[in-house]
Image (cartoon, rainbow, N blue to C red):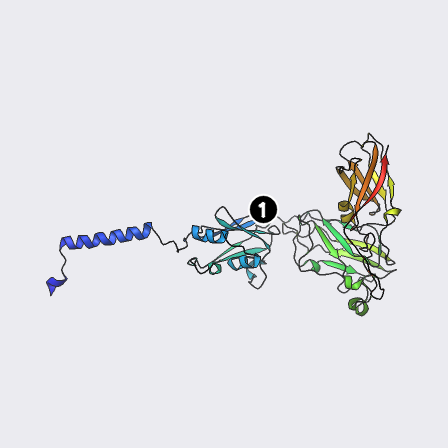
Amino acid sequence: MVGAVCLTFSEFGFRASLLLVASWLASSFPANSVEPSSVSIRWHTNSNQPAVEVVGLNEETLRHLLNTNWQSEEWQKLLSVYAGQGDSMTMNVPAMIGSYRIQNDAIRFEPKFPWQRGLTYRAVYRAAGLSARIDKASGQIISKFSLPAAPYNPTTIVSQIYPSGDVLPENLLKFYVHFSAPMQGGHIYEHIHLRDEAGHSVELPFLELEEELWNAEMTRLTLFIDPGRIKRGVKPLEEVGPALEEGKRYTLEIDAAWLDNMGMPLRESFRKAFRVSAQDRDPPSLQTWKISAPKAGTRDALTVAFPEPMDQALALRLIRVASPSGRLVQGTSALAAHEQVWSFRPQEFWTVGAHQLQVQNTIEDLAGNNIGKVFEVDLFDNVQRRFTNAVIKLSFEVR
């Protein structure tokens, strides 16, 4: 019996050699279905191009992802990024919005807004989000990131609020709030207050949108008065009343606790006081605009005076100048006199001839009335309107 379990030296060497070969083959040629252990999450902290990447994926996974036509909801099942306050952040908050793609052998997510100081970000990669034919051995990977705190030195301010005038119509549609540096979004309505003459807060005056209306630089916020507090015949106006009432005074207040993109509060609060005039239900008429033409051979400003203030952002964007040949004239436009005077200074000298002021009819006054169309049509008026996006042209002569 003893002899039955004994191995000769040659037999032992042969079997040991087989074990060594098998071990070498396993380490040198891993199965294609196994995700490399080097899969990891990488953060790109450059504020100009923030991104999160999942790197170390195998070729089969990358090929599969390149051939998908996923929408954001499907990508989020594979890679989600969350933002919250400190270590108390939970997964109950919705994932950040942004764009996904495969780039440089990695899954790349670019958020819509830059990273913000004071927030903790959590990226979650779930290999279970891959199809059944792709191995899911890497399981779930979680990575956290936050920008370092900046030295406490608040410098950001509210630089301007439009409309800039101190008399505004009762059916005012919106404010533009400009900041001197990029701000943090989210929970903005906690820092914006509309107060009456007694200092009391007006109840829910703004249209509180889930997706806030910021420009790309996060330096300008568009703030709409709730249209339900403006349009006649709708329940909010009948039950709660208008947000603004003719003859009364109000103050729009931006408090200093609002954080900028560096995690710093505003240097100071900002208050805009104004008086409310009657409703404006008349659409703008270009026939009432007064054009002052410049002289040929100069770079003097062309000016246009309006009989009423116009929407600041739209007036700068929707008014253009065309040369006698029909080519758009390049230059810089500006507004003055509480948005009642538009001016344009060309890059090159004015030439002699008939020029055109080209205005899109979607331009608005402070109440949101367009050319040929009022913002509010009384629900009891039997009014039918046709309204298309068109360009209206006014001629002026440069001599």
Asked whether residue 201 appears in the rendered view, the answer is no
Location of mark 1 (residue) = 49
Instruction: Give the number of marks.
Output: 1
**Do we see residue 9 in this rendering?**
yes
Question: Mark 1 Cα within 10 Å, few/some/many (few <14, many 20+)?
Answer: few
> What type is the residue that disc 1 sits on?
Gln
At which x and y percent is residue 98?
A: 59, 53
Q: In which quadrant will I find the N terminus?
A: bottom left
Which residue is more in the foreground, 39 or 362? 362
Residue that protrudes farthest toward the bottom in the picture: 239
The quadrant of the image that shows the C terminus is top right
Compared with residue 243, is residue 59 higher up or lower down, i.e. above or below? above
Q: Nearer the viewer, residue 30 or 244?
A: 30
Q: Nearer the viewer, residue 141 or 72?
A: 72
Q: As drawn, is 128 to the left or to the right of 212? A: left
- Where residue 36 appears, as percent x and y from the top left, is 41, 53
91 is higher (above) or lower (below) than 345: below
Against 255, is 295 above or below? above
Kindly state the secondary structure of the residue where label 1 is placed: loop
Q: Residue at x 78, y 69 (%)?
A: 235
Seen at 68% across and 56% down, the residue is: 212
Question: x%, y% of residue 198?
Answer: 82, 62
Residue 345 screen position, x and y as percent: 79, 37
